[in-house]
Amino acid sequence: MFYLYVLAAAAAALVVWRMRAPADLRINRRYLARFMTDSTGRGPRKVELVRIPVWLKPAELEEHAYFHVEADFTDGSTQQATVQILYPLESLQREREQQQKPLMAEDFNVMQNPARLGGHSQDDAAKFKEDPLRELTAERKLIEQKTAQFDREVEQLRRLNSCGDLFPRLIAYDRAQHIAILTPVGGKRLDTVLHESPPDVRLQLLQDVLVRLAVFHASSGSLSLDLPSKGTGVRLADASPRALYVYNGVVRPLNYGQLKQDIVLLDVIELVCDPAVQLTPEEEFDLLKYYIRARFPAEDDQSAVLAELLRLAVHYRA
């Protein structure tokens, strides 16, 4: 009986620790040594992980978790990266929770539901007496679908990396673990950085990202991305300051997998006209012209594009 109490206490401590822990247990020194080494070929001696906050729309599932990794090595060097983890059963987990059913497979997001570490109860098992194989088959099918989607998104990132410096670069992709390792985007969102920065720094950050956004808009049409056709060009999944991150003074989007075919000028409006940017009307107008000059440097008459941006700005605020 004493051992049962010890095991129960250990299980409770593990659950509490996982609830407080900011990272996935798989992201450790041994795992990262496969992809991050120093000048002597050794893996990191110390790793620190910080969960990157991701802004989600209402009812949007958090199928991906992101971490900022800082690795120290024995040769005195330091490397940083962004680790992206896909939890393919998140949607099914939400559905099962609503139906009070557990998942059969073990590929679930422990950060969203740490209590699952304790296993299934007898009541849980009873719910699957009728046809547990059907439930397990549904989970495996969903894992296959989400893995194939992640494959497409990673391949899309490879193409995006070939046409500019807007997105993080792919370092490695572990298909079996549903993990992608990217160059660092940082752990702070652009809206937070803008709020904390003086006006000249805010302006510099916005000008820099608008130039790289213009390069992306001008070249993305040649990438042959498989996107739903709803417009004339490729634009970001979300260009608002809440979806962009700052690392070493460089602004980058984190979501590279949900690009859409639409009116690309909406990216500029979502960024420049967002209330979090805190621009005066004059500063906003100057930034719109700044983007136009970067996007269409050879055109003498840029008034038509400026008029379209101003029209979209009015529509955005309506």
Image (cartoon, helix red, strand yellow):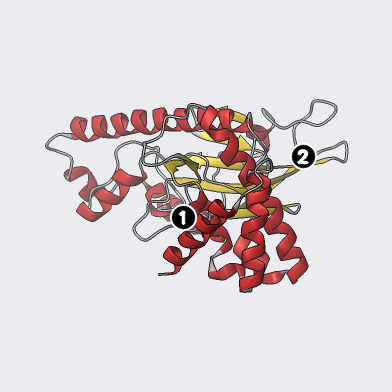
Q: Is residue 216 above or below residue 10?
A: above
Considering the numbered disc 2 on the image, is that residue within a helix, a strand or a loop? loop
122 displayed left or right of 37: left
- Residue 237 in view, yes or no: yes
Outermost residue toward the front?
Answer: 301
The answer to which image quadrant residue 141 occupies is top left
Q: Tell me the crowding category of disc 2: few under 14, some 14 to 19, or many 20 or more residues within 10 angstroms, Cα based.
A: few
**x 74%, y 59%: residue:** 204
Viewer-closest of 256 and 272: 272
Name the spot of residue 250 as percent of width and height, x first. Answer: 71, 50
Q: Which mark is residue 176?
A: none
Viewer-closest of 235 and 296: 296
**x 66%, y 46%: residue:** 300
Q: Is residue 265 above or below residue 75?
A: below
239 displayed left or right of 32: left
Considering the numbered disc 1 on the image, is that residue within a helix, a strand or a loop? helix
Name the spot of residue 156 as percent of width and height, x first. Answer: 51, 30
Mark nearer the N terminus (1 vs 2): 1
Viewer-closest of 96 and 213: 213
211 displayed left or right of 274: right
Amino acid type indicated by mark 1: Val
Marks 1, 2: nearer the viewer: 2
**x 29%, y 34%: residue:** 139
Q: Which residue is mark 1?
A: 15
- Residue 21 in view, yes or no: no
Outermost residue toward the right?
Answer: 75
Q: Tell me the crowding category of disc 1: few under 14, some 14 to 19, or many 20 or more residues within 10 angstroms, Cα based.
A: some
Q: Which residue is mark 2?
A: 45
Viewer-closest of 104 and 161: 161
Name the spot of residue 295 as percent of width and height, x first. Answer: 63, 44
> Label 1, label 2: how many angstroms apart (C-alpha)?
27 Å
**x 81%, y 38%: residue:** 73
